[in-house]
Amino acid sequence: MEGQAVTTNPLLIMAINMTVVFGVLIALGILMEIVHLVDPTKKKKTPVESSTPVAAFAASVASAPVQNDDEVVAAIVGAIVAMGYSSEQIASIRPTATSAKWRMEGRLSGRN
């Protein structure tokens, strides 16, 4: 092995390897930032033409009836607390779309 500079010092080998790894990671991070800045698929911002759609939406939301019944909310919270969760862990209660099978089961059993 004459003519080749071979090292057996493990600290030097570790330093070289770590320099290569972190150099590649830094280069990839810079490349990701460049791609993020030059992203051709990013949606362009459009200026808001007028505030009338926002005002109409706010008026429709304000005139909408309240969906949650107090007794139903209390029953749901009570059931969740009975399962071992605290009332602080409950973020929101909102209805979800029910499947056709559950609706049919309710109709067949006499519930509506």
Image (cartoon, rainbow, N blue to C red):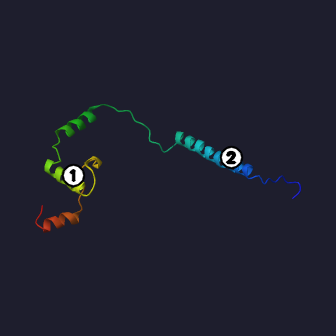
x and y, in percent, of residue 89 in the image: 29, 49
Q: Which mark is residue 19?
A: 2
Q: Quadrant of residue 51?
A: top left
Badge 1 marks a residue whose secondary structure is helix
In terms of depth relative to the viewer, which is nearer, 93 or 79? 79
Residue pictured at 35% horizontal, 33% vertical: 48
Residue at image x 27%, y 35%?
Answer: 54
Secondary element type, mark 2:
helix
Q: Residue furthest right?
A: 2
Looking at the image, is 51 positioned above or below residue 82? above
Image quadrant for the C terminus? Answer: bottom left
Along the horizontal axis of the image, is 98 left or right of 6?
Answer: left
Mark 2–mark 1 Cα distance, whole angstroms, equals 55 Å
- Amino acid type at circle 2 is Thr
Question: Would you say 102 lies left or right of 28 here?
Answer: left
**Residue 63 percent location from the top left of the image:** 16, 39
Crowding at dot 1, Cα within 10 Å, few <14 / some 14-19 / many 20+, comes out as: some
Name which residue type carries label 1.
Answer: Val
Q: Look at mark 1 in the image and give the residue it sits on.
A: 77
Q: Earlier in the sequence, mark 2 or mark 1?
A: 2
